[in-house]
Image: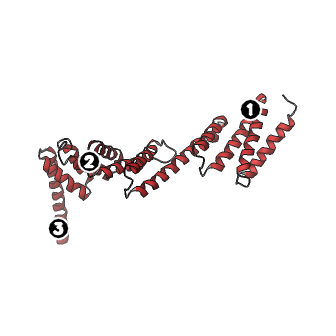
Amino acid sequence: MFKNRAFVGVVIAGIAMILSGCGEYEKLLKSRDYQKKYETGVTMYEEGTYVKAATLFDQVANIYRGTIKADTVKYYQAKSYYGQRDYMMAGHYFSELSATYPNSNFLEEADFMTAYCYYKQSPRPELDQDNTYKTITALQMFMVKYPNSERLSECQQIIVEMSDKLVEKSYISAKLYYDLGYYKSAILALRNSLMNYPETRYREELMFLILKSSYLLADKSIPSKQRERFQAALDEYYSFIGEFPDGIFSKEATRIYESSNKFLADNNNES
């Protein structure tokens, strides 16, 4: 029984301390003691209390503008949002730091983190890749600006990762037309993907899909267009088999060739 009372006492004391702490924080938010707000913000950031720290830095950022601490406040403001995984706001403040304080000691980290926040917002390949493009551009600019940075290797690794994502995005988007049965659009999209990323790991499949799309387009065409389109399918076959004679799609490609050739032979006398 006494143990239970002791436990309850500890819990109540803990709650009281929390409430007291919350009360002090609320008072600080309403005060004009900007130095204390700054110092408390730094302490809270270092303790991992990022939301409260960010709120304090939001309040003092304009107050310290034009002072020797201005870039430090902006730095902690950005880092506090990054700690919350709010990469959009963190990136905004890192970018603002770089643009406003070009002589800051935090400049290199701010430039890198601006790019890294784009990287953290880069979505899976099926979605819009605007942040992926921004990541690559920002990191390339960083590498030019800081050719001796210790972060160059990491930059290169991220650029490769983001480039691979763009390749996959291109492949997925192009293949979607094929999957939906829009073969004319598929041929155009598949060609564009190959033109944009000629070394893609999907090259064999993309070339085969161009061949198959050409064949299916011909097969489903009105009679007046079939001969021309089956001939186009044969041309695609020669392109594909010349590059991948023993590829995983070579047997199906041969069947398409034979079927297309048969149609042209059977309709040889048609104009």
**Residue 51 visible in the current orientation:** no
* Quadrant of res 191: top right
Residue type marked 3: Arg
Q: x, y (%) of residue 104?
A: 26, 49
Residue bearing the label numbered 2: 103
The answer to which of 146 and 110 lies nearer the viewer is 146
Residue type marked 2: Asn
The answer to which of 109 and 147 lies nearer the viewer is 147
Q: CA distance from mark 1 to mark 2?
A: 66 Å
Q: Residues within 10 Å of mark 1 (few under 14, many from 20)?
A: some
Report helix, strand or loop for mark 2: loop
Q: Which mark is residue 221?
A: 1
Q: Earlier in the sequence, mark 1 or mark 2?
A: 2
Residue type marked 1: Ser
**Residue 156 visible in the current orientation:** yes
Decide: is 19 above or below 187.
below
Q: CA distance from mark 3 to mark 2?
A: 59 Å
The residue at the point 38 percent across, 50 percent down is: 116
The residue at the point 67 percent across, 46 percent down is: 207
